[in-house]
Image (cartoon, rainbow, N blue to C red):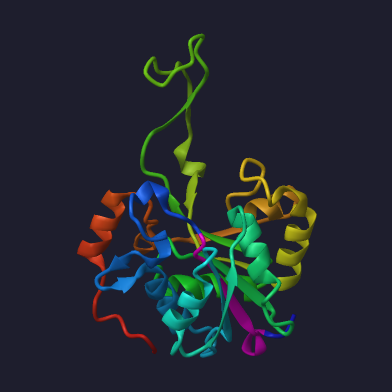
């Protein structure tokens, strides 16, 4: 990998989800917040990030089937090269399709969920800096503040009946993981290749790319996350995003 001042960074933006839990007619990435689609907010913040004064050099976006051309038009005008690919049957498959479109000369690949549209540039830069420092797989994470109970099955098993508590988990060792996650290109490609047979089955596919690295038995490094990188999943999340979004955020920096 090149030295830090020479690193070439690309970002994959996963935006192919239906967003069924959001209860909206549009795919989640196209749902507007403060007048702009969620995916555009996420893309702008990726493009505003810098490492050693270098921006990301390309952005590959996975779009829902049938929306590729619409995404191309929507993202036209961003200050980086943008490629849009059709997403797959799982998040893992969508990332793999996007990774295949990342330019060959890239050293660091960020994988970011459009559902976290307000991840600030400082967070993105922190992840890239950790990869540049020698950590081949990096995730941002927030300390868990709730008390966490480990539960077991019941004889009748239904949610209405509840579950017995098996123990209280030490939350000091827990982190709620966010995106973007950062990887050396070589490691991310290796991790996806090793798990390619699972990508078509949502029940087997990994929920994040760091999980694929963990399957290889390799280390993943955690850097501090950011409250602004919250995920939009439900209508309540969308309402909170409308109240907290910074409308003055620049499209370039």
Does the segment drawn in magenta span residue 115? Answer: no
The residue drawn where x is 48% and y is 10% is 156
Q: Name the image quarter holding residue 248.
A: bottom left
Considering only vertical position in the picture, is 10 above or below 6? above
Q: Is residue 169 left or right of residue 160?
A: right
Q: Where is residue 182 in the image (x, y as percent from the top left)?
A: 60, 67
Q: In which quadrant is the N terminus drawn?
A: bottom right
Q: Name the image quarter holding residue 62.
A: bottom right
Q: Position of residue 190 (x, y in %)?
A: 78, 62
* Nearer the observer, 77 or 123: 77
Q: Please say whether residue 180 is visible from this viewpoint.
A: no
Q: In this view, does 22 lie to the left or right of 110?
A: left
Span highlighted in magenta in the image = 4-16
Q: Name the image quarter holding residue 232.
A: bottom left
Q: Is residue 71 left or right of residue 83?
A: left
**How many labels, in total?**
0
Q: In which quadrant is the C terminus drawn?
A: bottom left
Considering only vertical position in the picture, is 15 above or below 251? above
Does the segment drawn in magenta span residue 5? Answer: yes
* Nearer the observer, 170 or 206: 206
Q: Residue furthest left?
A: 243
The residue drawn where x is 42% and y is 53% is 19
Considering only vertical position in the picture, is 152 above or below 237? above
Q: Position of residue 69 (x, y in %)?
A: 51, 77
Q: In this view, does 22 lie to the left or right of 137?
A: left
Q: Which residue lies furthest to the top in this view?
A: 155
Q: Where is residue 229 in the image (x, y as percent from the top left)?
A: 39, 62
The residue drawn where x is 46% and y is 42% is 172
């Amino acid at each position: 990998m090149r030295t830090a001042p020479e690193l070439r960074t690309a970002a994959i933006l996963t935006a192919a989800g239906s967003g069924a839990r959001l209860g909206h007619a549009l795919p989640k990435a196209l749902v507007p917040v403060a007048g702009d689609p969620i995916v555009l907010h996420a893309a702008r913040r990726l493009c505003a990030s810098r490492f050693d004064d270098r921006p990301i050099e390309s952005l590959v976006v996975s779009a829902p089937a049938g929306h590729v051309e619409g995404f191309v038009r929507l993202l036209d005008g961003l200050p980086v090269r943008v490629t849009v690919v059709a997403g797959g049957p799982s998040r893992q498959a969508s990332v793999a399709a996007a990774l295949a479109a990342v330019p060959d000369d890239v050293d660091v690949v960020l994988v970011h969920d459009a559902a976290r549209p307000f991840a600030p540039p400082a967070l993105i830069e922190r992840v890239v800096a950790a990869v540049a420092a020698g950590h081949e797989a990096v995730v941002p994470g927030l300390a868990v503040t709730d008390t966490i109970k480990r539960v077991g099955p019941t004889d009748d098993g239904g949610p209405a009946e509840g579950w017995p508590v098996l123990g209280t988990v030490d939350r000091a060792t827990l982190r709620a993981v966010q995106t973007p996650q950062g990887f050396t290109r070589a490691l991310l490609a290796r991790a996806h290749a090793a798990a390619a047979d699972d990508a078509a089955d949502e029940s087997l596919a990994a929920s994040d790319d760091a999980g694929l690295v963990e399957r290889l038995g390799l280390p993943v490094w955690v850097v501090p996350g950011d409250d602004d990188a919250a995920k939009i999943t439900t209508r309540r999340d969308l309402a909170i995003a409308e109240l907290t979004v910074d409308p003055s955020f620049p499209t370039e920096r």
